[in-house]
Image (cartoon, rainbow, N blue to C red):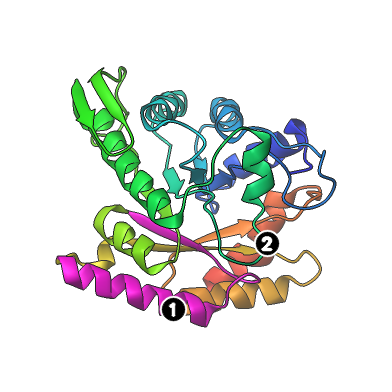
Amino acid sequence: MHLAYDDILRVWEEADELPELADAWLWDHLMPLAGPPGGAVLEGWTLLAALAARTSRLGLGLLVTSNRLRAPAHLGKIATTVDAISHGRLIMGLGVGGTQQPEGPNPAVAEYAAYGLSLPRPAEGLARLTETITILRRMWTEETFDHDGPFTVLRGTRNGPGPVRPGGPPLLLGGWGDRTLRVVAEHADIWNVPGPPHNSTDWIAGRARVLDAHCAAIGRDPAEIIRSAQIIVDYADPAASRAHVRALVAAGVRHIVLALPRPYPPRAARWLVDEIVDPVRQSVA
């Protein structure tokens, strides 16, 4: 939010040249969540397609796609198109999206009202997410199919060209509620949650134990699911950011997303490598 396309492109193209950085991510909101309410926000999947065409190495995705913004099969077509543009570099990040909340601020209320979207209750949002996962998997593995679900009916669905990788892109699911973690256990290749400053490492470790229990209940090896967390880096205090990353690694997190506050400084991606990635790798090797 509050960033121009050229600023984002500059950082992505720089990161694409740095093998220490595995992938790059966008978000999926239509209005700013902070700052001037009329500030710039570019639509996530459209922007991702543009960046996929301007990079050649980075894995890429949305952290995470809101399942409420697009119909499931339409989302599958969009994602498959970006996968084709990127030559198979897409990671399918997905989450429930906005839902009704009993208390506290809920930025989704204004955003969804502005774009004519309804906020479901949490149970419905989770059921819709599960249905979307089913439809995506079928679009990526079957030539044609029908679907009769609680929210979506499809007839003669085809998706050509198919994904670059057999079976489709890896599925990253974001979320932390007990019921969401059951869906993660059943379907995800990667599980992502916000880390510091939003959530502590101890909190993430507690949520990971809940995920492990769900895996045990369905007979899945929890080691099959990569643990992922993002932190907001501090340009003025890279030592604190390094400490957050080391703590996450010690807690079993193996995929770290380093979120850059705006505005992006010159050579922001190089700064991440020099100040955070390389020092952490040396200290935890």
**Residue in the image at 44% along x and 46% along y:** 94
Please state which of residues 171 and 236 is positioned toward the viewer in this rendering. Answer: 171
Contact between marks 1 and 2 (CB within 8 A): the answer is: no
Question: Is residue 63 found inside the magenta-colored segment of the image?
Answer: no
Q: Is residue 227 above or below residue 9?
A: below
List the residue tagged with mark 1: 205
The magenta span reads: 189-218
* Dominant secondary structure of the residues highlighted in magenta in the image: helix
Query: In the image, what residue type sits under mark 2?
Result: Pro
Q: Nearer the viewer, mark 1 or mark 2?
A: 2
Label at residue 105: 2
Q: Position of residue 21 (x, y in %)?
A: 55, 51
Q: Is residue 211 above or below residue 228?
A: below
Residue 284 showing in the rendered view: no
Q: Position of residue 63 (x, y in %)?
A: 53, 49
Q: Position of residue 221 (x, y in %)?
A: 20, 67
